Amino acid sequence: MLDSVASVRDFAFAARETSALPIRFEAVTFAAGPTRILHGVDVTLVPGSPTVLMGPNGCGKTTLLKLAMGLLTQIGGAITFAGGPAPAGSRAIVFQKPIMLRRTAAANVAYALRAAGKPADEANVRRLLDLAQIAPLAARPARRLSGGEQQRLALARALACEPQVLLLDEPTSSLDPASTKLVEDIIAQVSASGIKVVMATHDIGQARRLAGDVVFLAKGRLIEHAAADRFFNDPVSEEARSFLAGNLVI
Amino acid sequence: MKAHGLLIAFAATLLLLTPQAQAQDKSIVVASTTSTQDSGLFGHILPMFKAKTGIDVKVISQGTGQAIDTGRRGDADVVFVHAKAQEEKFVAEGFGVRRFDVMYNDFILIGPKSDPAGVKGGKDIVTALKAIEAKASPFVSRGDKSGTHAAELALWKVASIDPAGTKPSWYREIGQGMGAALNTASAMGAYVLSDRGTWLAFKTRDALEISIEGDKRLFNQYGIILVNPEKHAHAKKELGQAFIDWVISKEGQAAIASHTINGEQLFFPNAGGATN
Amino acid sequence: MDGATAFDLILSGDRTLFAIVRLSLTVTVLATLLAAVVAMPLGAAVALTRFPFRNVVIVVLNGLMGLPPVVVGLMVFLMLSRSGPLGEMGILFTPTAMTIAQAILVAPIIAALTRQLIEDLWTEYRDELTAMEVGPIGRVQTLLWDARFSLVTILLAGFGRAAAEVGTVMIVGGNIDGFTRVMTTTIALETSKGNLPLAIGLGIVLIALILAVNALAWSVREWAERHAG
C-alpha cells in the first residue's frame, strides 16, 4: 500500500504547481434542448481533500462534472481554472459506466499514456496497473473484466495523463462492497498524493468516508456548499436535511 | 497492427496463385456463339490449335448479334458466328476484314413428345410453324438477336406469320441462350428451334424430341471474320489470321469434322475461301 | 467436364475445377480487399464528419448496397471496352476487369456498414476520447482498430456478395474457359447446357467454400477477441 502511494506521488504530485486550481463556477447555466439542467451555479473548488457532489438523481451532478471536463459547454456563466482555461492534460474523468477500449487492460493504459504524450513503456503501464491493483489482469481483454475491475482500470487510465483534477461520476454505483472498498482506497491514495478529486455520489456513507467538502445540488441549483463535518452534522437547507434523513427528495 | 501484415501477406499469396495466363501475350479473343461453345466444339478443336501454334484462344460465347457487336467495339480479334446477312453487313461496314465460310450444321424443330400441334415427322418447317400457330401450341423463341433467333424469324416470315410483332400468348421470347431455351421448352412443353449441335450436347431432354429435320431451309452456315485492324489498331491481326487460316485449312476442317457426340457428327466443314 | 459430377471432379482432384475455384477465390478476395481499402476510410469519414446533405449521402450509400450486379457489369463493360474511355488499357475480358467490377459492387456495402458501425462505436467512445484529448486522426485510427472484429464481419458480407454474384463477372469477364471462368459462371454455363447435376454439384461446392471462408474468419475472430478484445 505504501508503495502505491509513493508511486502516485512520483508522477502525479512531483513538484507541480496546481495551475488548474481553484476551479471557479460562476453563474453556470446549462440546458439540453428546452430543459434547464443547471440554474446559475456559483461554486469554487479549492485544493485539498475530495469535493463530493451530492443530491437527488437528476440534480445536475453528472452535468457539472462533464462541464468541468469540457465535454459539455455551458450556455451561460463561466468556468475557470486558476483564473483561466484548463491547461491541457490537467483534467481527467472516470464515468459512471466505464468505457473500455476493445483491447487488453494493459493496452488501455498504454493508449491513455500515448494520448497524454507520456512514454507508454512497460514500466509506466505496470505502475498504473499496480496502482489500480489490476496488474495480474494486464493481458485480459478490458471488456471481459468485471465491473469493479473495469472501474479500477478506468481510474488507472485517467491517471495516465498525471492530472491535477480527477473527476469521478459515481464510480462505485454498481459495485459490491468489496469492489467499492478497493476503489475508495485508490481514491484516497490519489487524493493523498495531491490530486484534487471531485466526485459525484449518491452513497451517503461513501461521502462521509471521503469528502473534505460537499456540494449539495437539487433541481439544478446549488443548495449548500460546506465542509463535510458541517454538512453532515448540521445541514442548513431543508432539502439537505431531508436527503440526509433518507427521505425521498424529488 | 499484426493483422494488417497478415492481410497483406494473404493478398500477396493470392496474387502469386493467380493463373499466369495474363503473362502470355500469345493469345486472341474470339467472339463466338453459344452453339459452338455449348456443343463442345471449342473444347475439342482449341487444344489442337494450341498444340500446333502455341496460341491461346479465349472464347467469349454470346448470341451472334452480341458477338458481332463485341467485334464491332474492338473487344475481340476474331468473330465466329452464324448469321450470314449480319456478318456481311459487319464486313461491309469495315469492321471485319473478310468473311470465310467454315462449316455448317442444321437447325431442327424440337417439340414435346406429346406433339400437341401434330407436326412430328414432317419435312416442311413452314407447314409445321403454321400448324403451331393454328393450334396455338407453346413456342419458345430465343429472342436474343442470336443467329438461331434470326433464322427462326426468317422462317416465320416465309410462313407469313409475325408472332414477334403480334406477340400471341403462345409465343414466348426468353432472351437467353440456346441451352436456356431448351430448358425452358422442356419445362413448358413447348416447341423450339435449335441448332443440332446444342441439341446433341444437351443433357436434360426429358420430354423433348426432334419434330422436324432435313428441310433445306434449316441449313445453318457458320462464318469467321478477322476484326479490322484499321478500325481497331490493337486487334491482333497476325494471331487472329493464324487462327482463321487454321480453321479453314485441311487440318482445321478435319478437326471440326472429328467432333462427335455419341458417334454423331455435329458440324460439317465446308470452307471454300472468302465469300466477299 | 462432360459426363462427370462435381463430386467425381473433387474426388479426382480435377485440375480444371481447382483452377476455377482458385480464380473465384482470387478475384473475390482481391475485389473485397480493394473495395475495403477505399470504402472503410470513406465510411469512417462519413461517420465522423458533419457536412451539408450528409443525410442524403447516407441514404445514397445505403441504397447503393442494392446495386444490381448486371448494371455494374454493364457500366464497367462500357468503360473498359475498346470503344470505351478506358479501352486503351485492354483489360476487358480479364480477371483484372472482374476484380474491378466486383470491387465496385461490394464497395458501397462495405462503406455503408462501416459508416453505421463506426458511428455507433463513436457514440460510445466520444466522451472518453474527447476527455483524453485525442485528435481527429487518432480518433479514426482508434475506432477502426477497435472495430476490427466487426469490420471482419463486414468484409465477409462483401465477400459473400461478390462470391455469389454472376452478372458482373459474366459481362466483364466473358466466361472464357481457363481464363475468366469462375464458379458462378460455370454454374450458369452448365445450367444452360442442361447439365443440371454438374451445375448443382458445383453450386454445392460454392456454398461449401463460402461457408468454409466464413467459418475460418469466425474462428479467427473468436480466438482474437478472447485474447485481445
Image: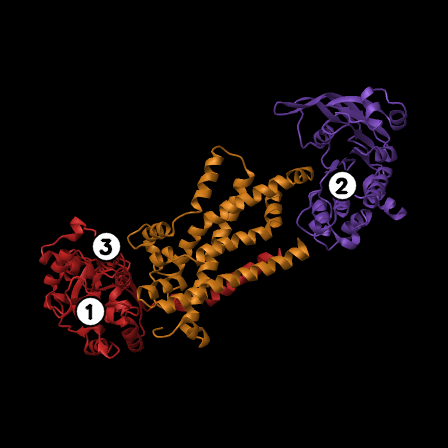
Chain colours: A purple, B red, C orange
Marks 1 and 3, how far apart in space?
Answer: 20 Å
Label 2 sits on a secondary structure element that is loop
Which three-letter amino acid code belongs to the residue tagged 3? Glu
State the residue position of label 2.
Answer: A174
Q: Looking at the image, can residue C14 be seen? A: no
Label for residue A93? none
Disc 2 versus disc 1: nearer the observer: 1
Q: Are marks 1 and 3 on the same chain?
A: yes
Q: Where does the C terminus of chain B fall, quadrant-wise? A: bottom left
State the residue position of label 3.
Answer: B173
Marks 2 and 3, how far apart in space?
Answer: 70 Å
Q: Is residue A57 above or below residue B265?
A: above
User: Viewer-proximal residue, B229 or C77?
Assistant: C77
Q: Is residue B268 above or below residue C97?
A: below
Q: Is residue B154 left or right of residue A16?
A: left
State the residue position of label 1.
Answer: B210
Instruction: Name the residue: 48% across, 32% down.
Output: C52
Marks 2 and 1, how far apart in space?
Answer: 82 Å
Q: Where is residue B242 drawn, in percent x and y?
A: 24, 71
CA neighbours of label 3 inside 10 A, class few (<14), some (14 to 19), many (20+): some
Which three-letter amino acid code belongs to the residue tagged 1? Ile
User: Viewer-proximal residue, B28 or A210?
Assistant: A210
Label 1 sits on a secondary structure element that is strand
Instruction: Name the residue: 59% across, 53% down.
Output: C149
Instruction: Name the residue: 83% across, 43% down.
Output: A177
Label 3 sits on a secondary structure element that is strand
Q: Where is residue B74 drawn, in percent x and y?
A: 26, 57
User: Viewer-proximal residue, A7 or C180?
Assistant: C180
Q: Where does the N terminus of chain B fall, quadrant-wise? A: bottom right
